[in-house]
Image (spheres, grey):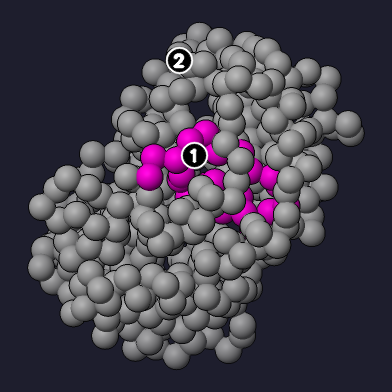
């Protein structure tokens, strides 16, 4: 687990190994610029943690990783996984421009080909064949775990809303930001107070979802300090380790940028408003590019409530379902396909029962997530 974001994806995968007494799972944390928060995340999981220095001297039967950095130093076949919705960002202005995650440097860490490259959609395989054709023989399209678990949870939307504390007559507005200079987070200072000022608290609840890399870059204390006044104004801020997926399932509207969370919002029935589309950062053939043309863009010239109402009136479920269909080529099948792949590379027969795709766990109430800097130090 290089980062918390990678860790969240891996947790869905290692759940497929539960109840198998033949397999011992260990965790390690390779050096990474966004590694802040990983030790605490691993401690909450309660698994066996192997120091990176020891891990590179140990023989394992299989390595699962959602990022390429340093994994070539591990002595085991590697199964490489994506950590977001498809591959929606592109890298420009470097010697190896291309779609992040599908460039040769991403697919062959240390110049070594993995045992398997896991993909969610056939479109990803087509891009991989173009960018790194030598990886095509080990690539396998298995689907997307986030799509499947969110889909399995949609029927319980009312239960998630009650768990979050969204009362009758309240609307939940989820504000989602990826990381980086083109992200919505760079505009939180103006957007969040505006939302809190314009949306009546007896009708709306506002919750901010920040990419874990934001917390890792600036520190939990600093992000909480920056957003302390927003919290006082009524904005709820989800902690970096929390499961954001249940918030999306419960949301009435999603305001987001070009990140994975916004793209996963197409799985729900919530209208989406974008805060701009930095086209130079979006892979042109990705679901994020499709969403940038389908969703209305939030304007500073009109009231927030007016724009939410417009987005709801113009919302066409079929348009968003078409975008969501580009997330996975095998809806509902990730658990079965991924478990088969893992056991094949372990050289073991699968357990004699179908793997389950469980609904998401119920979240804590919104007012239980996070603290202000003053509360944290008290």
For mark 2, what is the residue?
Answer: 226
Which structural element holds mark 1? loop
Is residue 273 in the magenta section? yes
Q: Is residue 58 left or right of residue 165?
A: left
Q: Is residue 349 left or right of residue 163?
A: left
In magenta, the rendered stretch is 257-279
**Label placed on residue 257:** 1
Q: Quadrant of residue 358?
A: bottom right
What is the x, y in percent for residue 220?
41, 25
What is the x, y in percent for residue 140?
38, 80
Which structural element holds mark 2? helix
Question: Is residue 226 visible in this depiction of the protein?
Answer: yes
**Label placed on residue 71:** none
Q: Residues within 10 Å of mark 2 (few under 14, many from 20)?
A: some
Residue displayed at 61% across by 41% down:
296
What is the x, y in percent for residue 277?
45, 40
Residue displayed at 47% across by 53% down:
288
Q: Quadrant of residue 199?
A: top right
**Closer to the N terminus: mark 2 or mark 1?**
2
Residue displayed at 77% across by 34% down:
309
């Amino acid at each position: 687990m290089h980062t918390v974001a990678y860790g969240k994806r891996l947790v869905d995968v290692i759940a497929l190994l539960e109840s198998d007494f033949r397999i011992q799972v260990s965790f390690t944390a390779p050096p990474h610029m966004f590694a802040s928060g990983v030790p605490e995340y691993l401690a909450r999981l309660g698994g066996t943690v192997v120091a990176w220095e020891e891990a590179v001297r140990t023989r394992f039967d299989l390595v699962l990783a959602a990022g390429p950095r340093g994994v070539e130093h591990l002595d085991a076949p590697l199964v490489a996984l994506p950590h977001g919705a498809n591959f929606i960002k592109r890298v420009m202005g470097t010697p190896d421009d291309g779609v992040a995650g599908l460039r040769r440097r991403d697919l062959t860490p240390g110049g070594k080909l993995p045992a398997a490259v896991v993909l969610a959609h056939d479109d990803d395989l087509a891009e991989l064949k173009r960018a790194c054709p030598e990886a095509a023989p080990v690539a396998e399209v298995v689907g997307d775990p986030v799509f499947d678990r969110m889909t399995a949870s949609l029927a319980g939307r009312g239960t998630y809303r009650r768990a979050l504390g969204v009362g009758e007559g309240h609307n939940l507005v989820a504000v989602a930001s990826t990381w980086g200079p083109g992200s919505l987070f760079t505009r939180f200072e103006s957007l969040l107070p505006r939302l809190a000022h314009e949306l009546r608290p007896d009708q709306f609840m506002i919750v901010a979802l920040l990419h874990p890399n934001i917390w890792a870059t600036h520190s939990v204390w600093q992000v909480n300090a920056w957003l302390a006044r927003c919290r006082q104004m009524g904005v709820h801020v989800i902690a970096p380790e929390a499961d954001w997926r249940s918030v999306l399932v419960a949301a009435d509207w999603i305001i987001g940028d070009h990140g994975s969370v916004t793209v996963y919002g197409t799985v729900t029935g919530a209208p989406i408003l974008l805060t701009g589309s930095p086209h130079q950062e979006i892979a042109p053939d990705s679901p994020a590019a499709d969403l940038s043309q389908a969703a209305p863009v939030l304007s500073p010239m009109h009231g927030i409530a007016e724009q939410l109402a417009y987005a709801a009136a113009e919302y066409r479920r079929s348009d968003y379902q078409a975008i969501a269909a580009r997330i996975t080529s095998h809806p509902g099948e990730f658990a079965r396909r991924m478990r088969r792949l893992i056991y094949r590379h372990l050289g073991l027969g699968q357990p004699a029962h179908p793997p389950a795709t469980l609904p998401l766990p119920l979240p804590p109430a919104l007012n239980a997530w996070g603290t202000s800097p003053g509360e944290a130090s008290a």
